[in-house]
Image: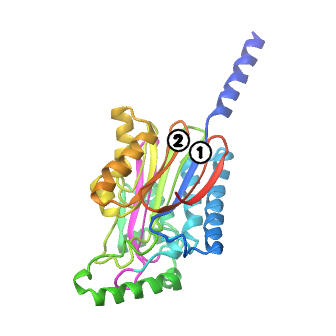
Amino acid sequence: MKAIVAALLLFIAMTAQAKPIAIVIHGGAGKIDRDTLTPERESLYHDTLRQALRAGHAILDQGGTALDAVEAAIVVMEDAPLFNAGKGAVFTAEGKNELDASIMDGRALQAGAIGGVTTVKNPIRAARAVMEKSPHVLFTNRGAEKFASDNGLEMVDPKYFFTERRWKQIQTWRKQQKAKPQAAAEPDRHADYFGTVGCVALDANGNLAAGTSTGGMTGKRFGRIGDSPIIGAGTYADNRTAGISCTGHGEYFIRHAVAHDIPARMAYKNESLAKASADVVHTVLKPVGGSGGIIGVDTHGNVVMEFNTPAMSRGFIDRDGKTKTAIFK
């Protein structure tokens, strides 16, 4: 009898250890000229992506939650001026940095998001606070900032988000608008990397989480909100299928409910994560002009990174421990 019990305990322990963990991140999809990307800057992209992966994977490796891993990885990218999120956010037409973020827990489909904030240092943390400390899903603008402050999150002067690179971009955009007044309301979605950041993780307990954070589009106007803080458009996670984070021209991702459509295809059509992702990105989005990409992890730890643009900065540590980062196809 003792031998049977010992064998059973050993089997349970081995089964627990065998449960996969995985993490995947993106730093934005869009147009980037390989010839103008210096070796030093390309190396910095890879180094920062690896830093974000390590921050999230270390939590998973120690038995931590997918939510903690997603938050940790995104905070690294929000704090890095390379990306269009947090410190490196683009400027609006009015010369402001307005930030959006969302996070979702696949266990019970809980989610939180914020939009249009200008003083929250790490928007992804505020999104998680909305999920865990309020009965709501999405707060915007001053209400979101008050909520973040009331819950003890780090607040900063709007000047914190200023970077010379992004300031030059908005100046270039303004000159282009003067040259073509009829295009004054059109945000810049062609000339630069989108830069939105995101992460999806699977923890050892089989729980999925996804998060996305962005500064939006250069030259966006009138309090524009894209897909990143919209649950089902830019972010989605469901333990029954997969977690998804999106990046690209948000209006198209909202119209086609991209982050939800992929898990829905898996559930209703019994498609794999890879097939559902490829179909949505290439046969749904691309024909209508929806530029961008997605990252995802399914319940088995399979990872996808699918995009229809010339580049998407991205990386993963898969269920076998393999690590990879990339920018171009």
Q: Quadrant of residue 250?
A: bottom left
The Cα–Cα distance between marks 2 and 1, rounded to whole angstroms, is 11 Å
Residue bearing the label numbered 2: 207
Q: Quadrant of residue 5?
A: top right
Amino acid type assigned to the residue bearing label 2 in the image: Asn
Asked which secondary structure carries label 2, the reply is: loop
The residue at 43%/56% (across/down) is 293
The residue at 45%/61% (across/down) is 127
Q: Is residue 252 magenta?
A: no
Extreme residue in the front direction: 35
The quadrant of the picture occupied by the N terminus is top right
Circle nearer the viewer, 2 or 1: 1
Numbered circle sitting on residue 22: 1
Numbered circle sitting on residue 262: none
Amino acid type assigned to the residue bearing label 1 in the image: Ala
Q: Which residues are magenta?
A: 92-119
Res. 165 in view: yes
- Estimate the x, y position of residue 110 in percent, counting from the top left: 41, 48
Task: Tell me how many marks there are.
Answer: 2
Looking at the image, which is closer to me, 316 or 214? 316
Asked which secondary structure carries label 1, the reply is: strand
- Estimate the x, y position of residue 284 in percent, counting from the top left: 31, 50
Res. 163 in view: no
Is 255 located above or below residue 108 in the figure?
below
Is 166 located above or below residue 10 in the figure?
below
Is 103 located above or below residue 215 in the figure?
above
Q: Is residue 95 magenta?
A: yes
- Estimate the x, y position of residue 297 in percent, counting from the top left: 51, 44
Classed neighbour count for the residue bearing mark 1: other residues with Cα under 10 Å, few (<14), some (14–19), many (≥20): many
Choose the circle earlier in sequence order: 2 or 1. Answer: 1
